[in-house]
Image (spheres, rainbow, N blue to C red):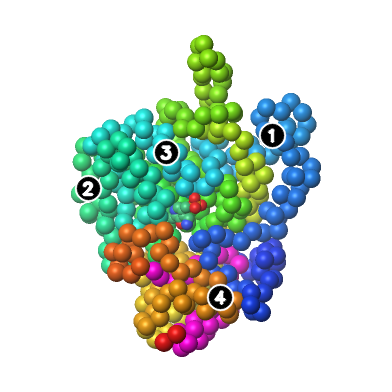
Amino acid sequence: ELTLDVVKVRADFPILERKVHGYPLIYLDNAATSQTPRQVIATFDDYYRRYNANIHRGLHTLADEATAAYEGTRETVRAFLNARERREIVFTRGTTEAINLVANAWGRANLKAGDEVLVSLMEHHSNIVPWQLLAEQLGIVIKVIPVDERGVLDLDAYRDLFTERTRLVAVNHVSNAFGTINPVKELAGIAHAHDALILIDGAQAAPHEPIDVQDIDADFYAFSGHKVYGPTGAGALYGKAALLEAMPPWQGGGEMIKTVSFDTGTSFADIPHRFEAGTPAIAEVIALGKALEWVSGIGLELIGGWEQQLLAHATERLVAVDGLRILGTAPHKAGVISFVVDGAHSQDIGLLIDQLGVAIRTGHHCAQPLLTHFGVDATCRASFAAYNTPEEIDIFVDALERVIGMVR
Ligand code: PMP
């Protein structure tokens, strides 16, 4: 059976050679941001040394090269998501901006007071707050899809939430707080049966499993490059061409127009450029393409399988820790484990374990409604990537036990 060559993978990540407080770095905060392979880092050096130029309005060699590389990433993202067409890919700063784009461009044009948007209890704040802003501004109604005690969406309750006013379902593919993998294809089918659209926040899914927006039948799908071994500042929104075409722009500026006139008014560019006002993060987008090529070079099946092994090993070790409770016990989980420890504050654990070189996340993970529902205001979260190893997990759990001994 094919398995990931983790030694080879690790060799691509210079940051893994560094020490933190004298200890080798053990980086288990991948759900917040993943580390960057040297091939992606090198893209920046190459871009700024050789072909830094503004895109699309060039007519000189450097501008042509930069435009070709930028638009090349559009094709890479199209293939990564298995979208039908390149023009269905809009570059954004990340997932947050992608969701805000849908809320502002699609939402303002299509939602009226009393229309309903379903969001799940396990959403990241970035898939809650944009809808709350629209609720304030337009009078739309937000309804919350509940979760069970394992952190799994309640599908019966989901079905029951639909009315003839339901216009959109906004859910994540994978929960950043608990790691739950949601049945997005089924959720989409149910939404469509009720003539509602579905927007999927794929921020935590894109790094862990192959995405197929056509198979899911997603209307909108968003992800962030910096969680898929790419740089910060570049991500993408997939939208079905017919939907994007019917949407007005949400930001005005250069690059997004056909003609501008004070007399006859302004006409807008075709999709996707209508939604990319101003100079974009050119180097970052090009580097995002390199990151996705790096991922595809290994294969998300292989990466996901490796992370499942890490998850199983970490779960087995963590449940044996005295007084430790894992939150989120869904049968289908990505490589994310949230936990709390009796008699030890999550924040203290995070600070002390950092002193031993281990980077985990503590806090509410921008999912306060979910944590509140589970009766906690913070958890510790370990999340895995292709370069993590079972040995690192052992060091992490040993360090955790040491830290718990110190704070109790
Ligand atoms: N949704 C989920 C599920 C996330 O995990 C994150 C990042 N933590 C976001 C949205 C927001 O992504 P970004 O900050 O890159 O826009």
> What amino acid does circle 1 point to?
Asn
Classed neighbour count for the residue bearing mark 2: other residues with Cα under 10 Å, few (<14), some (14–19), many (≥20): some
Residue type highlighted by circle 2 = Leu
Residue 168, by quadrant, is top left
Name, please, the residue furthest toward the top: 263
- Viewer-side label of 4, 2: 4
Q: Which residue is mark 2?
A: 161
**Of marks 2 and 3, the one in the foreground:** 3
Marked residue nearer the N-terminal end (3 or 4) = 3
Which circle's residue, 4 or 1, is located before the other in the chain?
1
- The structure residue drawn at horizontal position 62% and vertical position 35%, both measured from the top left corner, is 279
**1 vs 2, front mark:** 1
Tell me: residue 7, above or below residue 63.
Answer: below
Q: Which disc number belongs to residue 102?
A: 3
Packing grade of label 3 (10 A; few <14, some 14-19, many >=20) is: many
- SS at mark 2? helix
Q: What residue sits right under mark 4 in the picture?
A: 354
Is residue 4 found inside the magenta-colored segment of the image? no
Q: Determine which residue is flagged by label 1.
A: 54
Task: Measure the alpha-carbon separation of dots 4 and 2.
Answer: 43 Å
Do labels 3 and 4 touch, CB within 8 Å? Answer: no
Which is nearer the N-term, disc 1 or disc 2? 1
Which region shows up in magenta?
Answer: 378-406
Task: Look at the image and tell me in which quarter the C terminus lies.
Answer: bottom left
Q: Sequence order check: which comes first, mark 2 or mark 3? A: 3
Task: Provide residue 308's location: percent of width, then percent of height.
Answer: 49, 68
Residue 324: x and y, percent? 39, 80
